Image: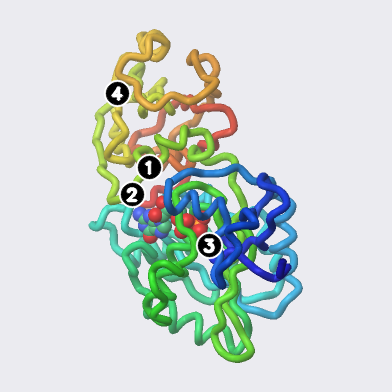
Amino acid sequence: MNKEMKCFGCGAIIQSENEKHIGYVPKSAINKDKILCQRCFQLKNYHKLQQTTLTKDDFLNCLQQIGEKDCLVVYMIDLFDYNGSLIQGLIRHIGHNDVLVLANKRDILPKSVKERKLEHWVRRQLKEEGIKPVDVIITSGKKHMNLDLIYDAIMTHRQNRDVYVVGVTNVGKSTFINALLKHYADVENQNLITVSEFPGTTLNLIEIPLDEKTSLYDTPGIINDSQMTHLLKPQDIKSVIPQSELRPMVFQLNSDQTLYFGGLARLDYCVGEQANFVAYFSKNLKIHRTKTQKADDLYNRHQALQYEIEGIEDITQMKSYEFQLPSGKCDIVISGLGFITISSHGGKIRMLVPPHISVLMREAII
Ligand code: GDP
């Protein structure tokens, strides 16, 4: 078999030896020029995810290799889950190279928020990470938003160098690259690279030639274990992870009141005067308000709570975090699930989330 043959969906090297490893295709199916590995084939046709054996180290090695090159790095982050989409230590890996930041999934945030405001917010956050981008562009790969602007920025800043698109899994890299291909290269739909809502579908570098000497590369994402996506049952992912504009839900809470976000997370307002809580989650996620005193019992009886997480049968198995609220506005973010903007005169809340899921307080984005 030709060792250089790659899956056009995920870029994995095609092999017929081990069904559990990436790039597997049964020998009998290797009869075309363009081959889709079994994993991508199943994902595309049956929406089924096969487990693979690619490790986190493989992802990090890939970044390190980018760091050794003189190139333009296009760093995609997710506006909906900004912190969850950061690559830890990116600057250490990519060193001296220019970074163009694309802030994706703008379509999920309410339309009323101005692009300028989002851009400034992203720039402030990046500064805290020590990242000095050549530019920040707000986009939605899904809606082809600002695609011309991005294309021009890439062409301007790459200065005849290769371009590497990096980002954690699920940030929307494949969708974005497909949009670029569709827009500028007239690539037919069946040859587009694999896009899915399952984390970790892009496995190896996918090369897209820009001219005779240089290329744009889609890189594998770094899996971020602290995102809610990784704990959900595959059939629940699509309804829990927002696909379209978030529906803000406003709650005036007094202390000792609780909000449940499906059965996936809980907020207790422990101390403080009446305050304003605006929840930004998927339209499908039911938010249930109750008295804190009754909240454990409610969860344990599984009433009105959707989307269970395997291994969690009792509320005490959730992890608890306390936050002191500042006077004014702040966001509490549950990685990959949504966020709550709280306007208060100060106070204390407690968040309950499944173990390993990150929950943090940040400057309000809206
Ligand atoms: P990758 O792992 O970074 O390559 O991400 P994918 O391109 O496979 O996208 C992951 C999930 O995010 C899929 O469910 C996409 O439909 C979704 N997605 C990608 N881009 C956007 C976007 O601009 N807006 C929204 N709402 N969803 C997006």
Nearer the camera: disc 3 or disc 1: 3
How far across and how far down the image is residue 19, in percent? 66, 47
Spatial CA distance of label 2 from label 1 is 8 Å
Spatial CA distance of label 4 from label 3 is 40 Å
Question: Height in image: 271 above or below 177?
Answer: above
Mark 2 in CB contact with mark 1 (< 8 angstroms): yes
Question: Mark 2 highlights which residue?
Answer: 243
Residue in front for this viewpoint, 189 or 57: 189
Question: Mark 1 highlights which residue?
Answer: 238
Give residue 165's mark. Answer: none
Say what secondary structure mark 4 lies in: strand
Question: Disc 4 or 3, which lies upstream in sequence?
Answer: 3
Give the residue type that dot 2 points to: Gln
Give the residue type that dot 1 points to: Lys
Residue in front for this viewpoint, 135 or 201: 201
Q: What colour scheme does the image use?
A: rainbow
Question: Mark 4 highlights which residue?
Answer: 288
Question: Mark 3 highlights which residue?
Answer: 9
Spatial CA distance of label 3 from label 2 is 22 Å
How far across and how far down the image is residue 198, in percent? 49, 47
Q: Is residue 128 visible?
A: no
Question: Disc 2 or 1, which lies upstream in sequence?
Answer: 1
Question: Disc 1 or 4, which lies upstream in sequence?
Answer: 1
Question: Disc 2 or 4, which lies upstream in sequence?
Answer: 2
The residue that appears at 46% across and 43% down in the rendered structure is 336
Q: Is residue 116 visible?
A: yes
* CA neighbours of label 3 inside 10 A, class few (<14), some (14 to 19), many (20+): many
Give the residue type that dot 4 points to: His
Say what secondary structure mark 3 lies in: loop
Horizontal relation, residue 262 to residue 42: left or right: left
